[in-house]
Amino acid sequence: MERTFAIIKPDAFAAGSAGKILARIYAEGFKVVGLKKLYLSKVEAEGFYAVHSERPFFGELTDFMSSGPCIVMALEAENAISKWRDLMGATNPAEAAEGTLRKEFGSNIGENATHGSDAPETAAFELGYFFNGMELL
Ligand code: CMP
């Protein structure tokens, strides 16, 4: 079993899509081992996305991620990292396959409904950024 970190981003939360996304998560066989609703500050968003701090879209990305409530989750499944990335679809919703979450709920490359860790090391950092061990059940 593997764990990954996931976010239902502020665009999807504001659109009222969190329930539908969670239903897909359960239907696909993930176990939700941690879940919190948070309203990130700009500084918290900058810390989370620090790996992108030199990118031209960093300001836009962290403004967006601190623009409203989101849901952060720890998901467990066999090959959870790739399984969740497959369910999300391509980063840019315009390029995402039919049936993926970003295709259905995303608007553009910035407001793309969901986030997921891209590797075991990233998952470890991202899970630890938002959850302590006692919160993952
Ligand atoms: P995410 O999986 O959360 O990881 C980093 C995010 O940066 C990514 O999803 C996109 O939402 C965002 N991103 C990537 N490229 C761009 C871009 N060119 N313009 C705006 N945001 C971007």
Image (cartoon, helix red, strand yellow):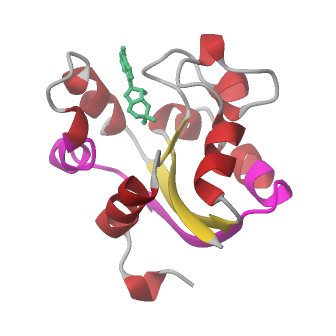
The percent coordinates of residue 32 (x first, y second) are 65, 69
* Side (left or right) of 101 relative to 118: right
* Side (left or right) of 122 relative to 55: right
Q: Quadrant of residue 57?
A: top left
The verdict on residue 32 being magenta is yes
Q: Residue at x 40, y 84 (%)?
A: 133
The percent coordinates of residue 86 (x first, y second) are 69, 39
Q: How many marks?
A: 0
Specify the segment rendered in magenta. Answer: 24-50
The verdict on residue 2 being magenta is no
Q: Residue furthest right?
A: 27
* Side (left or right) of 27 relative to 83: right
Q: Residue at x 35, y 79 (%)?
A: 132
The percent coordinates of residue 90 (x first, y second) are 60, 25
Is residue 134 placed above or below 136 in the rendered structure?
below
Is residue 130 placed above or below 25 in the rendered structure?
below
